[in-house]
Image (spheres, helix red, strand yellow):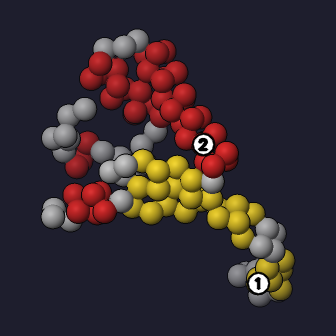
Amino acid sequence: MNNNIEQNQLSSNISRNEISDAIFNEFGLSKSECNNFVSQIINLLIDSLIKDGFVKIPGFGTFRLRYKKTRSGRNPKTKEPAEISSRYVILFKVSQQLKNRLNDN
């Protein structure tokens, strides 16, 4: 992909369609192939995260599952005590290469 993308061309969130369009523009695959390709990559990342508990993308960062136990909390509106259920959350740690690139080092 073109590394000279202007900042104003990027949205604050990137959609599947935007990724598909970038692949379409760069490689000339059909739109349906591009959409399928993006869906397969996302599903692969999700399946790997569920199976292994982490996904490491060299030069980008690591996604990791973390289990949070049930805990006591407070409803911010009513200030009433509330129980926060146990759940998994996804953590992301940026790679050093990406940190350096973002900070022009």
Q: Earlier in the sequence, mark 1 or mark 2?
A: 2
Residue found farthest to the front? 52
Q: Residues within 10 Å of mark 1 (few under 14, many from 20)?
A: few
| Image location (x, y in percent) of residue 2 | 20, 34
Q: Quadrant of the N terminus?
A: top left
Q: Is residue 92 left or right of residue 79?
A: left
Q: Quadrant of the C terminus?
A: bottom left
When asked about the image quadrant of residue 25, the answer is top left
Q: Secondary structure at mark 2?
A: helix
Q: Secondary structure at mark 1?
A: strand
The structure residue drawn at horizontal position 82% and vertical position 86%, both measured from the top left corner, is: 80
Task: Find disc 2 in the rendering and name its residue.
Answer: 48
| Image location (x, y in percent) of residue 91 | 55, 62
Query: Which one is in front, 10 or 88?
Result: 88
Instruction: Name the mark nearer the viewer: 1 or 2.
Output: 2
Q: Residues within 10 Å of mark 2 (few under 14, many from 20)?
A: some
The structure residue drawn at horizontal position 63% and vertical position 49%, both measured from the top left corner, is: 52
Q: Is residue 25 left or right of residue 14?
A: left
Q: Which numbered disc covers residue 19? A: none
Task: Find disc 1 in the rendering and name its residue.
Answer: 74
The structure residue drawn at horizontal position 19% and vertical position 40%, both measured from the top left corner, is: 3
Check disc 2 and give the amino acid type. Answer: Ser
CB atoms of marks 1 and 2 within 8 Å: no
Query: Which one is in front, 76 or 32?
Result: 32
Image vertical order of residue 68 relative to residue 63, above or below: below
Q: Is residue 96 visible?
A: yes
